[in-house]
């Protein structure tokens, strides 16, 4: 695999990439996203991911670069344009896309309509299905979370951040790791208790992601996303209690409300509350059907 390296120099020197002042998009403990432009590409707007460096983080950075390079041709992945390893904190240069989250709790943008939310879900399900099926070994993302989902100017959702990605060898159904990676609230219980990494790790995380899109609540902080509460909602027919009230503003056709219910029930299947957990390809096909209904 190969990728292009881009130099980042001071603004008063010949350069290929400019970092814009005051352009920090998000800042986390070990990563910062910043906006910049490429001056040799019609001032193309780009996103720069700066990562903390040292120890086992080196392997994570290399993994992110490697997997990003493999999937950059797919429209539902954040495209890697190049990288700069000469900095104190290595930087990855990616196509520019906006985060779907709006605050430190990574709540999704409340202005996203129902139609945009279901399209985001379908796009990300496509990317996960691709990771699971497109290569001779199965790739598990292991951190399906709103902060790793971005929207380009055309409204296409893209999955990014492959630092925690692992592979399952051909002919095997799982690998085992006892050091948990991912985000609390999105972790498959089987992975948490036994360290088993299967495709279900991503399916479970995606199911929680669907619930977040539907409710704009935060897993682990809101009791309304606890499995016991969700089960009671289904039993009592109280779907409306989980829906984001901002999303519900305005008039909806009966078909759209039915779509929300089908979306909710599919999310419960993904987290193991309604029958057998589906594969990501099945989830993607069902989301396409719901979106078109």
Image: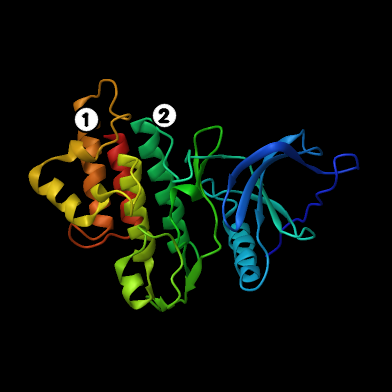
Rendered view: 221 above or below 216: below
- Work out whether 68 lies above or below 37: below
Asked whether, in this view, residue 196 is left or right of residue 75, the answer is: left
Pointer 2: what residue?
Answer: 111
Residue 137 appearing in the image: no
For residue 255, which numbered disc appears in the image? 1
Residue at image position (61%, 49%) is: 79
In front: mark 2 or mark 1? 2
* Residue 251 position by quadrant: top left
Compare residues 140 and 193 and report the one nearer the observer: 193
Position of residue 195 measured from the top left corner of the image (x, y, whole percent): 38, 76
Q: Secondary structure at mark 1?
A: helix
Q: How many marks?
A: 2
Q: Quadrant of the N terminus?
A: bottom right
- Point out the residue furthest to the left here: 236
Say which element carries label 2: loop
Residue 127 vs residue 109, the one in the foreground: 109
Please name whichever residue, 44 or 143, is drawn nearer the observer in this view of the structure. 143
Expressed as whole percent of the image width and height from the top left, the position of residue 9 reads 84, 48
Disc 2 residue crowd, few under 14, some 14–19, many 20+, Cα 10 Å: few
Residue 257 image-quadrant placement: top left
- Residue at 24% across, 47% down: 224
Mark 2 vs mark 1, CA separation in Å: 21 Å
Image quadrant in which the C terminus is located: top left
Q: Does residue 212 sit above or below 256 in this rendering?
A: below
Instruction: Give the side of residue 168 with respect to residue 257, left or right.
Output: right
Residue 265 in percent (x, y) is at 21, 48
The answer to whether residue 212 is visible is yes
Q: Residue at x 90, y 42 (%)?
A: 14
**Figure quadrant of residue 108:** top left
User: Which badge, 2 or 1, is on the more N-terminal residue?
Assistant: 2
């Amino acid at each position: 695999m190969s990728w292009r390296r881009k130099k980042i120099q001071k603004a008063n020197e010949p350069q290929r990439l400019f970092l814009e002042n005051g352009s920090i998009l998000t800042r986390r403990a070990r990563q910062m996203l910043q906006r910049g432009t490429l001056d040799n590409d019609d001032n193309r707007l780009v996103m720069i991911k700066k990562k903390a460096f040292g120890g086992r983080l080196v392997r994570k950075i290399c993994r992110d670069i490697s997997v990003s390079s493999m999937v950059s041709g797919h429209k539902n992945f954040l495209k890697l344009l190049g990288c700069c390893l000469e900095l104190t904190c290595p930087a990855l240069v990616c196509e520019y896309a906006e985060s779907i989250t709006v605050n430190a709790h990574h709540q999704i943008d409340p202005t996203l309509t129902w139609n945009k939310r279901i399209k985001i879900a379908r796009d990300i399900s496509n990317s996960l299905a691709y990771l699971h099926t497109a290569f001779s070994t199965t790739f598990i993302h292991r951190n399906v979370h709103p902060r790793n989902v971005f929207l380009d100017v055309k409204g296409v959702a893209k999955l990014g951040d492959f630092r925690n990605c692992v592979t399952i060898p051909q002919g095997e159904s799982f690998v085992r790791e006892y050091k948990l990676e991912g985000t609390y609230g999105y972790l498959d219980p089987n992975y948490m208790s036994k360290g088993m990494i299967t495709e279900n790790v991503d399916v479970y995380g995606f199911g929680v992601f669907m619930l977040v899109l539907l409710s704009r609540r935060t897993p682990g902080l809101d009791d309304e996303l606890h499995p016991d509460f969700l089960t009671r909602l289904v039993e009592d027919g109280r779907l409306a209690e989980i829906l984001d009230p901002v999303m519900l503003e305005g008039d909806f056709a009966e078909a759209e409300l039915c779509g929300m219910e089908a979306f909710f029930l599919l999310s419960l299947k993904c987290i193991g509350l309604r029958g057998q957990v589906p594969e990501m390809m099945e989830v993607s096909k069902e989301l396409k059907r719901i979106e078109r209904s």
